Amino acid sequence: MEKTAYFINGVGLISPQFTFDHGAGFLSQPQEYASNTLHCVTPDFKTYINPVQLRRLSRFLRIGLSSAIICLRDAKNENPDGIITSTGYGFLVDTAKFLIELLTQQEKHLTPTYFMQGTYNALGGLVALYVKCSGYNTTHVSKGVAFETALWDAMMQLQVNDSTHFLVGSYDEADPVLFAVNSKAGHYKLEPVPSLALFESKSTGSLQGEGAAFFFISAQANEQTYCRIRDIRMMYKPNDELTTALHDFLRVNAMSVADIDVVINGASGDVVHDRIIDTICDTIFNQVVQLKFKHLCGEYCTASSFAVWMGASVLKKQHIPPVARANQIPAPPSIKTVLILNQYMARNYSFILLAKH
């Protein structure tokens, strides 16, 4: 039986960079932030959402729905067979508003809007209503591997029926309370660090980020195709086992280190959390083109979706954005494979292998 292939046939990303406009340059105008929180650069929402509907949506539902619409338009297909979303913490701002109202009004005469827009599956339901999709719809909430789990879900669905198409997305918003809690735990930097100089800082903690990304996944390639998803692997606190797992991952896919053209390093700027993944990149992939991305989008549970967008764009455009470069190894004439190595809080690790279709 022939193995099912998985292709990214459309992308939509709203992030702290100018990533929503496919006609603009590929990270050609990098945005730098002086604070330790990176917020999304947003488009004119009226371009994507009816103004009547727009006024009823919270900020991040607007961002999420717009990124889904951008993806569908990019794929030239607005009829997915299923919608799979993912998030680490959901819509924290609306959840907080609901809880505050619950307390201040002593559970009486509550506004249902905050509750409805604060649930994890609010975005998946909203996108389904927009595209009139009554098919498979689920949301994965698994912290640092939520997006990888959503991708894996879509791949399994395509194994069952390879004529279907899935809209796979992720979202996480920067929240002041989450920033305060994680700062006390040492996950975010206490001293101000310019975002583009993140990796020059040799302290613990990262920068808080946010973003919403969608990908149109199919088992068939077409003229819109960005790349092929070869494989995904997720691990929890692997420690010294990560190197062994990486070699096994490449072996299973009939590849070696020499077959990798570009590595996208998911280092977060935290000298402790980055230790294992940086060691791998400095030893195993020291002769391979390396990119980093969390100085562009910040750290959040589903930041790996930004890396997949970057890897897919590198393969389609055959261009390495200078702002993402982590070394000066010359790129090969034809970039055929991109390997993403991501870590979240030194707990969740993942490998995502992308290839030119």
Image (spheres, rainbow, N blue to C red):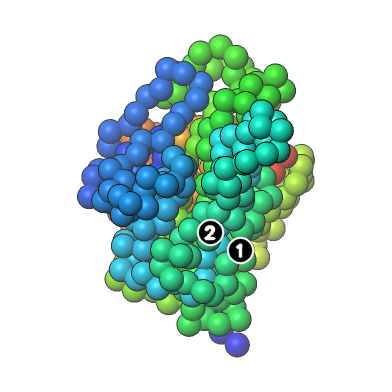
Which quadrant of the view contains residue 39?
A: top left
Label 2 crowd (10 A; few <14 / some 14-19 / many >=20): many
Distance in Å between CA atoms under marks 1 and 2: 7 Å
Residue pointed to by mark 1: 138
Q: Position of residue 83 (x, y in %)?
A: 52, 65
Residue 320: which quarter of the image? top left
Judged from this view, the residue extending furthest toward the front is: 109
Q: Residue furthest bottom?
A: 1
68 or 267: nearer the viewer: 68
Q: Are marks 1 and 2 in contact (CB under 8 Å)?
A: yes
Would you call the spot at circle 1 few (<14 residues within 10 Å), some (14-19), or many (20 or more)? some
Sequence-first disc among 1 and 2: 2
Q: Which residue is mark 2?
A: 124
Residue at 59% across / 55% down in the picture? 121
- Give residue 148's position: percent from left, percent from top: 60, 55
Residue in view at x 53 percent, y 33 percent: 174
Horizontal side of 51 relative to 241 (left or right) equals left
Amino acid tagged 2: Gly
Please state the total of marks drawn on the protein image: 2
Q: Using the image, determine if residue 212 lies above or below residue 140.
A: above
Left or right: residue 297 versus residue 322 is right
Q: Position of residue 189 (x, y in %)?
A: 59, 19
Residue 16 in the image, given as x and y percentages of width and height: 40, 35
The residue located at (54%, 46%) in the rendering is 113
